[in-house]
Image: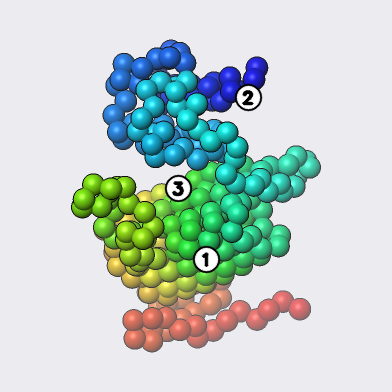
Amino acid sequence: MTAADRLVEQVLDAVRHIRPGTAPGPDTDFRDLGLDSLDRLTLAVAVERATGLAVPGPALSDAATPADLAGRLPTTDRSAPVHQQHRGDTPEPGWSDPGASVGEGTRLWHQSQVTDGAVVGTDCTLGKGSFIGAGSTIGDRVKIGNYANVFGADVGDEAMICPGALLLEDPAPRATTPDGHRKGPEDWTRHPVTIGTGATIGAAAVIAPGVTVGPHALVALGAVVMRDVPAHGLVIGNPARQVGWVCRCGHTLDAALRCTTCPRTYRRDGDELAAEHQPVPLE
């Protein structure tokens, strides 16, 4: 099988994924499969994850068949593979675009991507299919879960971005300018998210543009965060609301602001928490 044939098969597999129960061929018309514009976006994501190739905007909108879409994909990878070793000594490639910076000891798992202009610190873990967009700054010892998307955010050291989380930066998302031209980087103003040191963003949570999540805060899974979260704050729901406080270790505090798991205690300092007692380090 040639590389071109393999690419067509990968596109077909992506089509079958979003249209289960169908048996499309290379020349099956997308209109016959009922693919609307949202389906095409879903298809583009599936193709990019399967191939490691970026799907250009015109290819996504103009392609009529799986073979046509495969033929419109770039013939070379736009990113350079970064091979990391994991248990079993099997290399797992992530992708680091030209102009991206990835620190020493950071592991990029399969299909993860760091784009041009993004900076990732040392000893981080980027899970399968995660995406770090231009302008993002990721601190040291950060964990980015599978398929999390970070668009231009400033993420502090030792933060945890769980699988499927979205950190957004465009407060007025449109595909085109008012005169109908496709938007480029110069056509909008960035409002990046800020994630504090040691904070956790739960699985499938969405952080709105411009929001700051304070150090050691915890955003519950599936929460939609529209306003700032204080340090150590625990927020849940859609829209997210604060329902309590969490310790540095990640567990909730009781009514007396004592950790339910470790010896730490806290006191209120305005709208923030201040540590009052720290456990004695073991010798």
Amino acid type assigned to the residue bearing label 1 in the image = Thr
Whole-Å distance between the Cαs marked 3 and 1? 19 Å
Residue 211, picture quadrant: bottom left
Q: Earlier in the sequence, mark 3 or mark 2?
A: 2
- Residue drawn at x 47%, y 33% is 46
Tag 3–tag 1 contact (CB < 8 Å): no
Q: Which residue is mark 3?
A: 164
Whole-Å distance between the Cαs marked 2 and 1? 35 Å
Q: Which residue is mark 2?
A: 3
235 relative position to 146: left or right:
left
Image quarter where the C terminus lies is: bottom right
**Mark 2 or 1, closer to the camera:** 2
Amino acid type assigned to the residue bearing label 3 in the image = Gly
Q: Judging from the image, what secondary structure is the residue with disc 3 in?
A: loop
170, above or below 174, in the image: below
Amino acid type assigned to the residue bearing label 2 in the image = Ala
Callout 2 crowding tier (Cα within 10 Å): few <14, some 14–19, many ≥20:
few
Q: Which residue is mark 1?
A: 137
